[in-house]
Image: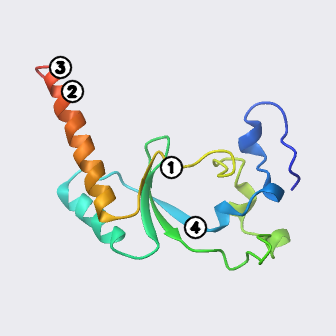
Amino acid sequence: MGSKVKKGRGSQRDHPPCRDCDARCCRYLAIEIDRPRTAADYDDIRWYLLHRQVAVFIDHDGIWHLEFRSRCEALGPDNRCTIYGCRPRICRKHGEENLCEFHASPYAVYMRTVEDLERYRAARSRSRRKKKGEHPGR
């Protein structure tokens, strides 16, 4: 892929500048998880975060993800794909449907530790209390 960005609708997202990037998208994988609603759900997330190289993030659309920091085995020492011609579909589609990490972070909220999760929950709780105070009867 070239480093030129095609002009027009969604151009930066449609054509990531792979030649200029250090393969940020090839250094982790993430799976979508349900947004926690109960104390038990948050306890599950706490368990995830107790593992090395694991994080939880919320993307800009409010979707929760479990992230595993793991370099792709097909990434060469020069940060180029060694199986580019037969790379998996998800790799071929990256940049067309997904946010390219070169242009913007996929993270609206990023939690790497249990303490990060606790800070997130505390801030969310404060925000809810404030809203209740501003809008009685809710």
Q: Residues within 10 Å of mark 2 (few under 14, many from 20)?
A: few
* Cα–Cα gap, marks 2 and 3: 6 Å
Q: Which residue is mark 1?
A: 107
* Cα–Cα gap, marks 1 and 3: 30 Å
- Nearest to N terminus: mark 3 or mark 4: 4
Q: Please tell me in which quadrant of the rendered image residue 73 appears.
A: bottom right
Task: Find out whether the residues at labels 4 and 1 contact each other: C-beta distance under 8 Å.
Answer: no
Q: Residues within 10 Å of mark 4 (few under 14, many from 20)?
A: some
Give me the residue at 21% from left, 27% from top. 131
Residue 49: give its label.
none
- Nearest to N terminus: mark 2 or mark 4: 4
As displayed, is residue 78 above or below residue 104?
Answer: below
The kind of secondary structure element at disc 2 is helix
In the figure, is residue 44 to the left or right of 132?
right
Q: Quadrant of the C terminus?
A: top left
Q: Which residue is mark 2?
A: 131
Q: Which residue is mark 3?
A: 135
The kind of secondary structure element at disc 4 is strand
Place of residue 85 in the rendered image (x, y in percent of width and height, measured from the top left): 85, 70
Q: Which residue is mark 4?
A: 28
Q: Quadrant of the N terminus?
A: bottom right
Place of residue 39 in the rendered image (x, y in percent of width and height, measured from the top left): 18, 57
Q: Residues within 10 Å of mark 3 (few under 14, many from 20)?
A: few
The amino acid pointed to by label 3 is His
The amino acid pointed to by label 4 is Tyr
* Cα–Cα gap, marks 4 and 1: 13 Å
The amino acid pointed to by label 1 is Tyr
Extreme-left residue of the structure? 137
- Nearest to N terminus: mark 1 or mark 3: 1
Place of residue 35 in the rendered image (x, y in percent of width and height, measured from the top left): 34, 51
As displayed, is residue 91 above or below residue 13?
Answer: below
Give me the residue at 20% from left, 38% from top. 126
